[in-house]
Image: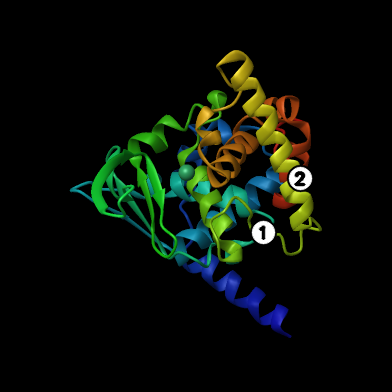
Amino acid sequence: MRGRFSAFWRRRRLARHALADADWDAVCARLPLVAGLDAATLARLRETATLFLAAKTVAPAAGFTLDQRQRIEIAIGAALPVLELGLGAYRWFHGVIVYPDAFLAPREEFDEAGVVHTGHEEVAGESWDAGPMLLSWRDVEDSREIEDGYHVVIHECAHKLDLGDGDMNGVPDLGGSGISGAEWQAVMSAAWEAMQDEEDACGDLPIDDYALHSPEEFFAVLSEHFFTVPAYLEQTLPEAFALLARFYRFDPRRGV
Ligand SMILES: [Zn+2]
């Protein structure tokens, strides 16, 4: 019975918050990210993006303004990673705050004497453990050209998924994926070491080198590459690509 009722509420929500065709089409036209998706996947993406905007507040900050098409563009980036996982995977946050450009995020650091120092760091996006997602609109725009594997919305959404098991540690909630914690650690550690070796040998990385900042950034950066340059990630780190395909239950290779 639950399924019948939730299907009813889902349809009602979709109808009440329906996106205008003109807005949806205009946003999709500027996003190579969705260009190769088949019609059925695109329809599910539209539903998920609609429900995302119905459930989350997407609000501007710092004197910025946002129109519906900008909100839809953010919602598409957020919807793609959870097409199969469902929006319940984002239950840890309720809002997205959008700055016009890179913004200053507060930072606290302890020095060797244990004294706390407060400061700020300029960032393109930020996901606090129990708080909203913060985004720079300029970086959302910079994410349109996906060839370089950069996508700030997918990156921050991966951090939110990482929190699914209660900890931001590079391991998302693996429930239902058939992947054990041990398997996840083994594949991701091997990929990390391969990239570390590459950096030691060449001084350069075939992926965004921010990945090696920490295990959580490794998962977030690999997730960006997974959805934006899937064939390249598969070629570079095939086991990590296969693991992410099982986790996201999605094959992002466009036109395959
Ligand atoms: Zn990050």
Q: Which residue is mark 1?
A: 85
In the image, 126: left or right of 204? Answer: left
Q: Which residue is mark 2?
A: 186
Instruction: Measure the alpha-carbon separation of dots 2 and 1.
Output: 23 Å
Residue positioned 46% across, 38% down in the render: 26
Q: Is 20 or 159 nearer to us in this picture?
A: 159
Residue 99 point in image, percent of width and height = 28, 45
- Give the SS element for disc 2: helix
The one nearer the camera, 16 or 3, is: 3
Picture layout, residue 211 above or below residue 249: above
Q: Amino acid at mark 2?
A: Ala
Q: Which mark is residue 249?
A: none
From this viewpoint, is residue 133 visible?
yes
Q: At label 1, which amino acid type do we have?
A: Leu
Relative to the observer, which residue lies in front, 89 or 63?
89
Q: Nearer the viewer's eye, disc 2 or disc 1?
A: 2
Q: Is residue 171 above or below residue 200?
A: below
Specify the farthest residue to the right. 178
Horizontal arrangement in the rendering, residue 144 relative to residue 223 (left or right) = left
State the residue lying farthest toward the bottom. 1
Q: Could you tell me if residue 245 is visible in this image?
A: no
- Quadrant including the C terminus: top right
**Between 194 and 65, the one nearer to me in the picture:** 194
The image's colour scheme reads rainbow
Q: Earlier in the sequence, mark 2 or mark 1?
A: 1
- Identity of the residue drawn at 77% across and 54% down: 182
Indicate the secondary structure of the residue bearing disc 1: loop
Describe residue 34's horizontal placement relative to residue 115 as left or right.
Answer: right
- Position of residue 156 relative to residue 47, above or below, is above
Could you classify mark 2 by the number of other residues whose Cα lies within 10 Å: few (under 14), some (14-19), or many (20 or more)?
few
